[in-house]
């Protein structure tokens, strides 16, 4: 048990982190006021005209803002669901491998994409799905018609979702492997004596045991449902697929920095942050209710 007299030392260790958090996360919050101004860089925040909720009203009249929010929800929800499902399935399958050297080799291979930047992966996928890329060559080999996959509103969204799952599921499986490793081996031995095969063991022992972990991860992921992956989409999107691929983060970047509509971009970003905060609070309530997880 920690001596209360030495607790001040731990608080001192927190000071550098708290200072950095204050500088880069708290102070910039002052820029939120731009959402309620007609911000002009030459006048600054203090000299720009205050316009109240005008940008929020304008935002609600834009037809494309609804599409942007819809794209964000569809892409983010699909990523969350598939990442959890694939990670759980992979963890269960990997746990069934008894040859330790091969198991470690597979783990290493599937973990590696998580540490590769989306800038590098975007170049790789652009080459793979280009008109002369390997994917079109495979399609042509089986008698299909080559096409530009990444500029197709039909295919861009599925490609974004599948490539994100490919990149993340191996690393996401770590928590489920840890949960599986805590299962009492005697339960499997007892099931074997009763004549249960592998599938029955997985269905009646493995899945029920890791169910609280799956619920916890799912509910905590709810807080990031409006973060559909800015780095990935920004490096792979083109104007031809804004209809199905443009998300809130890329929209804010384009409107606020490229088109220099600073106040409007800030208003969109502020609305996103407020909704995200509500979802985060809701996710922690759900995690506490269904998984017994609490940060307080």
Image (cartoon, rainbow, N blue to C red):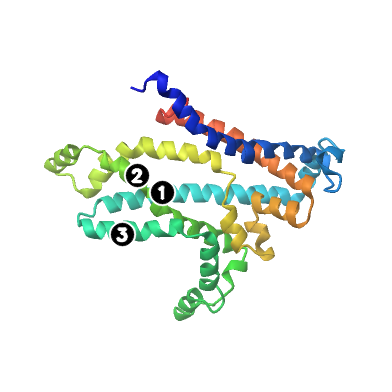
Where in the figure is residue 137, as x and y percent of width and height?
A: 48, 79
Given residues 59 and 51, the one toward you in this image is: 51
Label 3, label 2: how far apart the Cα atoms are? 16 Å
Identify the secondary structure beneath mark 2. helix
Crowd band around label 2 with a 10 angstrom C-alpha radius: few (<14), some (14–19), many (20+): many
Residue ID for mark 2: 176
Tell me which corner region of the image, top left, top right, bottom left or bottom right, holds residue 269: top right
Describe residue 90's horizontal placement relative to residue 77 as left or right: left
Label 1, label 2: how far apart the Cα atoms are? 8 Å
**Residue depicted at 41% across the width and 27% down the height:** 292
Residue ID for mark 3: 106
User: Compared to 292, does 256 lie above or below?
Assistant: below
- Farthest-out residue, top: 4
User: Compared to 77, does 150 lie above or below?
Assistant: below
Determine if residue 295 is in view: no
Where in the figure is residue 193, as x and y percent of width and height?
A: 11, 41
Where in the figure is residue 177, as x and y percent of width and height?
A: 31, 46
Crowd band around label 3 with a 10 angstrom C-alpha radius: few (<14), some (14–19), many (20+): few
Describe residue 83's horizontal placement relative to residue 29 as left or right: left
Residue ID for mark 1: 172
Determine if residue 209 is in view: yes
Label 3, label 1: how far apart the Cα atoms are? 14 Å
Q: Are marks 1 and 2 in contact (CB under 8 Å)?
A: yes
- Mark closest to the chain's N terminus, 3 or 1: 3
Identify the secondary structure beneath mark 3. helix
């Amino acid at each position: 048990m920690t001596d209360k007299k030495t607790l001040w030392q731990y608080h001192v260790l927190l000071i550098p982190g708290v200072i950095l958090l204050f500088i880069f996360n708290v102070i910039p919050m002052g820029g939120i006021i731009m959402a309620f101004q007609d911000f002009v860089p030459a006048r600054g925040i203090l000299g720009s005209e205050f316009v109240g909720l005008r940008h929020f009203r304008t935002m609600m009249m834009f037809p494309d803002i609804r599409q942007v929010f819809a794209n964000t929800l569809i892409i983010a929800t699909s990523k969350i669901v598939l990442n959890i499902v694939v990670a759980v399935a992979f963890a269960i399958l990997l746990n069934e491998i008894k040859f330790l050297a091969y198991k470690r080799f597979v783990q290493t291979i599937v973990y590696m994409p998580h540490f590769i930047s989306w800038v590098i992966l975007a170049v790789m996928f652009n080459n793979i799905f280009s008109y002369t890329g390997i994917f079109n060559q495979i399609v042509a080999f089986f008698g299909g018609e080559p096409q530009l996959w990444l500029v197709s509103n039909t295919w861009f969204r599925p490609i974004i979702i599948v490539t994100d799952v490919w990149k993340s599921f191996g690393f996401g499986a770590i928590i489920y492997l840890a949960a599986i490793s805590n299962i009492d081996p005697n339960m499997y031995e007892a099931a074997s004596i009763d004549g249960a095969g592998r599938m029955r063991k997985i269905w009646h022992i493995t899945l029920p045991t890791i169910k609280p972990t799956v619920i916890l991860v799912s509910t905590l992921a709810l807080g990031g449902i409006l973060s559909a992956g800015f780095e990935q989409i920004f490096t792979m999107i083109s104007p031809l697929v804004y209809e199905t691929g443009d998300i809130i983060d890329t929209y804010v970047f384009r409107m606020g920095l490229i088109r220099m509509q600073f106040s409007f971009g800030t208003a969109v970003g502020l609305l996103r942050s407020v909704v995200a905060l509500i979802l985060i609070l809701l996710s922690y309530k759900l995690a506490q209710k269904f998984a017994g997880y609490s940060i307080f």
